[in-house]
Image (cartoon, rainbow, N blue to C red):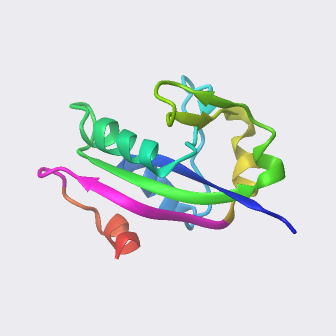
Amino acid sequence: MIKNITLYRPTGANELALIIDSGMKRFPPRLFWQPIFYPVLNFQYAAEIAERWNMGDPDSDGVGFVTEFEIPEEYFGKFPIQTVGLDHHQELWVPAEELDQFNDKIVNGIRVTKSFVGSKFIMPEKINNVLN
């Protein structure tokens, strides 16, 4: 029996719009200065990033989302887990050049499980349709 592992990815509005454009099936390519794609291993850490970084950063768009998805356990084991702070700050480090293959392994699509919205953010209709 194939077992799937649940992962989380905190995003801002721009990244979520690209995920929506993919039919909620793929994460967008990394930017040239981003060598890794790092989904996180637990909801708590993803929510901290979405709220404190994606929503709270003065250079951000004032909103943060937590997405959730699964990949097969045997594929999950291919990548190193990195603890980058507290014990629950665990990330899966996927080289940017492997993101297409990683996306192909996503089971049952990508879901938004939590949103953090600042008072100045105006929700685009495209995103609002996914949340409701």
Front-lying residue, 68 or 86: 86
- The reply to whether the magenta stretch includes residue 119 is yes
Q: How many marks?
A: 0
- The reply to whether the magenta stretch includes residue 90 is no
The quarter of the image holding the C terminus is: bottom left
Q: Residue at left 53%, top 58%?
A: 68
Quarter residue 24 falls in: bottom right
Front-lying residue, 65 or 7: 7
The picture places residue 121, in percent across and down from the top left corner, at 18, 52
Quarter residue 124 falls in: bottom left
The single residue placed furthest to the left in the displayed view is 119
Query: Is the residue 101 above or below the residue 92 in the image?
Result: below
**Horizontal relation, residue 33 to residue 13: left or right:** right
Q: Residue at left 47%, top 24%?
A: 85
- Stretch of the chain drawn in magenta: 108-121
The single residue placed furthest to the right in the displayed view is 1
Query: Is the residue 80 above or below the residue 126 in the image?
Result: above
The picture places residue 58, in percent across and down from the top left corner, at 21, 31
Q: Residue at left 30%, top 44%?
A: 51
**Horizontal relation, residue 101 to residue 16: left or right:** right
Q: Main secondary structure of the magenta part?
A: strand
Q: Residue at left 36%, top 41%?
A: 48
Query: Is the residue 64 above or below the residue 112 in the image?
Result: above
The picture places residue 14, in percent across and down from the top left corner, at 39, 48
The picture places residue 116, in percent across and down from the top left corner, at 27, 53
The quarter of the image holding the N terminus is: bottom right
